[in-house]
Image (tube, rainbow, N blue to C red):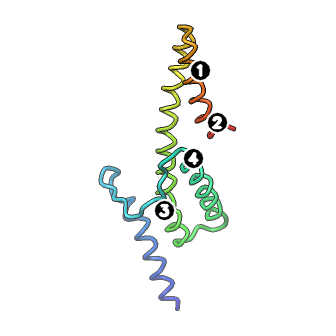
Amino acid sequence: MKKLSVISAALALVLVAAPALASDEKRSDHFKGKKSETLQQALDNMREYNKKLEELMHGELTPQKMAEIHQLTYTLEEALQKLDDEVDNLQEVLEEVHLGSEHMDFGKVKSNGKKYLENSGKIVK
């Protein structure tokens, strides 16, 4: 029984350590994260997977927990990338609001302001 536990621990370490030994450029995505195709999905995935990460961080870290953490980071990375893309888009839309306000372009401010508030409202309530 002890031998099986040691083998399980070794396998978990291999799953966790092998990708870390490779450079970022050569990193293979051997686990698929949950997709974040929209801002709302990204935020929902972050909430769900941050909670899972927090639960795994309680107490002693074990090889099994490390393997689980390794897997769930793929979903968090995907969510953060989508959030980064959406924030970049928000910056562009806000710039249009800014420029429209400088030129007294009421229509541009109204349409872009609405778009900005809708999307930023998903991030900041």
Between disc 3 and disc 1, whose residue precedes?
A: 3
Q: Earlier in the sequence, mark 2 or mark 1?
A: 1
Q: Secondary structure at mark 2?
A: helix
Residue 98 location (% of width, % of height): 55, 16
Query: Which of 107 and 87 lies nearest the eye of the viewer?
Result: 107
Which one is in front, 123 or 111? 111
* C-alpha span from label 2 to label 1: 16 Å
Q: According to the image, label 4 marks what residue?
A: 40
Image x and y of residue 80, in percent? 51, 46
Disc 4 residue type?
Answer: Gln
Crowding near the residue tagged with mark 2, few <14, some 14–19, many ≥20 C-alpha atoms within 10 Å? few
What mark, if any, has residue 121 been given in the picture? Answer: 2
Question: Badge 3 local density, few (<14 within 10 Å), some, or many (20+)?
Answer: some
Residue that numbered label 1 is attached to: 110
Q: Between disc 3 and disc 2, whose residue precedes?
A: 3
Amino acid type of the residue tagged 3 in the rendering: His
The answer to which of 11 and 31 lies nearer the viewer is 31
Classify 1 as above or below 39. Answer: below
- Indicate which label's residue lies in the foreground, 2 or 1: 1
- Residue 3's place in the image compared with 47, above or below, is below
> How far is mark 3 from mark 4, CA to CA?
23 Å
Residue position for label 3:
70
